[in-house]
Image (spheres, helix red, strand yellow):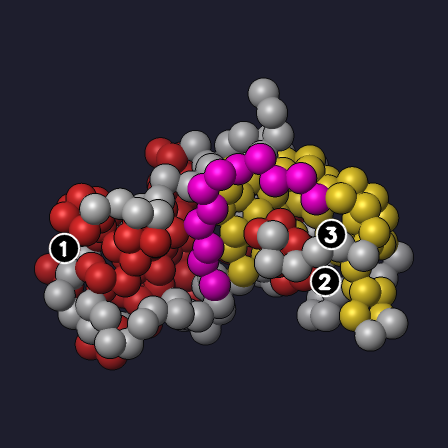
Amino acid sequence: MIPVLVFSEVGKHYRGREVLSGLDLTLEPGEILAILGPSGIGKSTLLRLAAGLDRPNRGTVTLAARRLGFVFQEPRLLPWRTALENVALPLLAQGIPPRSARERAAAMLARLELAAFAGAYPDMLSGGMRQRVSLARAFVVEPELLLLDEPFTGLDPELRRAIRRTLETLLAASGAAALHVTHDIEDIPAATRRILRLTAAGPCFEFPQARDIPAWKGAV
């Protein structure tokens, strides 16, 4: 199978400060890769490069995935659009007819138990509901690659666990590959089998096999 994403000797700097150096990364279809590291180490930069929103100063980034989904720290919903309209937006941007886009958006909201709130505006929804709408918007395009930038930040522990389980269900059903940036090892989906740690000494990979073994607990 063709990898959905390949970084080859990628380097990136801003105003003379090196953020990434010599990064090699291959993401296979359906693979979930967690990206860990302290603030300012280059995690969000890596996601921007993966999405094609920025270019490396050295090396190459090859993106084979045609459909991308994004989930950010904040839901980033348009406040003047309803939940249904927010979820339908990426479909409309792809040229999907409005009726079909609304139907697909409604079906995705129903999967996330938000059908009753399809007509609600973001300020009428709880924080957890808004983040689930954000997940619906990301998955409605049937992504081949999902980019997650600390999507559970600011949520209470019980809600974080609930939304993580929702994410795990959606990933398993979709077969999408994922890059998941986080500071908290407990936020990582259970199906994750590889961790990329970004450190001042350079990137390194770890291969934990289960959440209850020391490699998981010592990964941050």
Q: Name the residue under label 1.
A: 115
Residue 208 versus residue 5: which sits nearer the camera?
Answer: 5
Residue 46 at what x, y percent from top left?
Answer: 67, 55
Q: Residue at x 66, y 59 (%)?
A: 54
Q: Magenta stretch containing residue 64, yes or no?
A: yes
* Mark 1–mark 2 distance (CA, rounded to whole Å): 37 Å
Badge 1 or badge 2: first in the primary sequence: 2
Q: Which mark is residue 197?
A: 3
Amino acid type assigned to the residue bearing label 1 in the image: Ala
Q: Where is residue 76 in the image (x, y as percent from the top left)?
A: 39, 70
Residue 63: x percent and y percent?
61, 40
The answer to which quarter of the image holds residue 32 is top right
Element at badge 3?
strand
Query: Mark 2 or mark 3: which comes first in sequence?
Result: 2
Give the answer, above or below, for where 180 lies relative to 19. Answer: above
Q: Give the range drawn in magenta.
A: 61-72
Q: What residue is drawn where x is 67% and y is 39%?
A: 62
Say what amino acid the circle numbered 3 marks. Answer: Arg
Q: Distance between the residues labelled 1 and 3?
A: 38 Å
For the C terminus, the image quarter is bottom right
* Residue picked out by circle 2: 42
Identify which residue, 179 or 70, lies in the foreground: 70
